[in-house]
Amino acid sequence: MIPINAPQIGEEEITAVIEVLRSGVLTHSLGEGPMVKKFEDAFAKFVEAKYAFAVNNGTAALHMAILAVGIEPGDEVIIPSFTFVATAEAVVLAGGRPVFVDIDPATYNISPCEIEKAITPKTKAIVAVDLYGTPADLKHIREIAEKYGLKVIEDAAQAHGAVYRSKPVGYYADVTCWSFYASKNMTTGEGGMVTTNDPDIAEKLKLIRSHGEKEKYLSVMLGHNYRMSELQAAIGYVQLTKLPSFLFKRRVNAEKLTERLHEVNQLQLPLEAEDCRNSWYLYTIRVKNANRDKRDLLLHNLKLRGIGAEVYYATPIHWMPYYRRFGEFHLPETERASAQVLSLPVHPGVNLEQVNYIADTLIEILNQLKL
Ligand SMILES: *Cc1c(COP(=O)(O)O)cnc(C)c1O
């Protein structure tokens, strides 16, 4: 089976972890160990941010960002429903109410027009997700945020290395959140990062990461233990040096798929805007005339042929049992996409022969199923 994603770990990561183990410094009581700092500095430079805070996962990164921009119980936060559940979870953990809005069917990212319609006097922030590694329309979202005095958080968990309007993603947001989960473009097993250019937000992030402590045993605000260990940071630092080569391989695979599939009329292929670069975390196609059952049948047949295609996300968050309590949302584009999309493997472990096999097999099954 060609898996949808696979961590790319080499001897360099293994050596780096062993060195940390031998050093005896496994973590730091305020989350500021030497490896963590080295990783944060390198990551901040890579995404052109002033401040970076390493944390223990991407969900913690989002929760910290939500708290750091000042979301309090009763506040509304506008988010897409077509994303991983952590985006909504972070809002609810802070006592906020997630207000789900629809996507742009061409990019699958949150629609700026729909954002503006959902704003109320209780709205405090917008979370935009760079889904599949395709940058969201942050400049437009930033303009709306300024008009209404809202904060902007970017969930870039899938977008390491993505470029929006010639800048690394995150440039137009107040805070940007990253994940280093094992499936992502770079990994630390579990891990995350929060980046910002705002010194006040940076100060809060640092406090929230470790029990609200400025100094040990002197908490000045409510916090958590969201620290990253030195072991994870050592892996992350090496992975970051390899990220450009990972991104290059993903791009080669994605461009090959586009070349092989662009004449297949039944499919909508992923977009890459003129002055943007996708990170190609997932290569997501839409089977334009399929319903949910037909799409699932296609998925099943691909798997039978050894292709680990997956659906992100078959259940929009507003349909999940827990999240129904936040209201009844009618999101036709989100619901339609959730029934028609399908992601294909393009990770750095996939070679061109496999990409051609994926394209050939997909075309063959589409014809067989008369899709
Ligand atoms: C992976 C992911 C997260 C959560 O990251 P974890 O490190 O798994 O906690 C959040 N949002 C999106 C869009 C993701 O893909």
Image (spheres, rainbow, N blue to C red):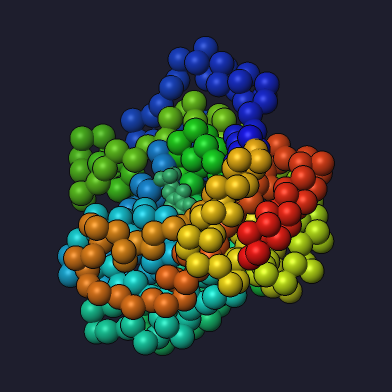
Image quadrant occupied by the C terminus: bottom right
Percent x, y for residue 190?
Answer: 45, 36
With respect to residue 30, does 44 lie above or below? below
| 310 and 112: which is toward the camera | 310
With respect to residue 77, does 65 lie above or below? above
| 186 and 83: which is toward the camera | 83
- Residue at horizontal 20 percent and vertical 61 percent from the top: 95
Q: Specify whether 87 is left or right of 336.
A: left
Question: In the orientation shown, which residue stands out farthest toward the top?
Answer: 22
- Residue at horizontal 42 percent and vertical 77 percent from the top: 332
Classify residue 246 by image quadrant: top right
Q: Specify whether 125 is left or right of 324.
A: right
Percent x, y for residue 319?
Answer: 31, 64
Total marks in image: 0
Percent x, y for residue 17?
Answer: 55, 21
With respect to residue 176, does 335 lie above or below? below
- Residue at horizontal 45 percent and vertical 20 percent from the top: 25
Residue 231 visible to the viewer? yes
Image quadrant occupied by the N terminus: top right
| 251 and 152: which is toward the camera | 251
Classify residue 201 by image quadrant: bottom left
Percent x, y for residue 353?
Answer: 82, 41
Residue 169 visible to the viewer? no
- Residue at horizontal 73 percent and vertical 49 percent from the top: 361
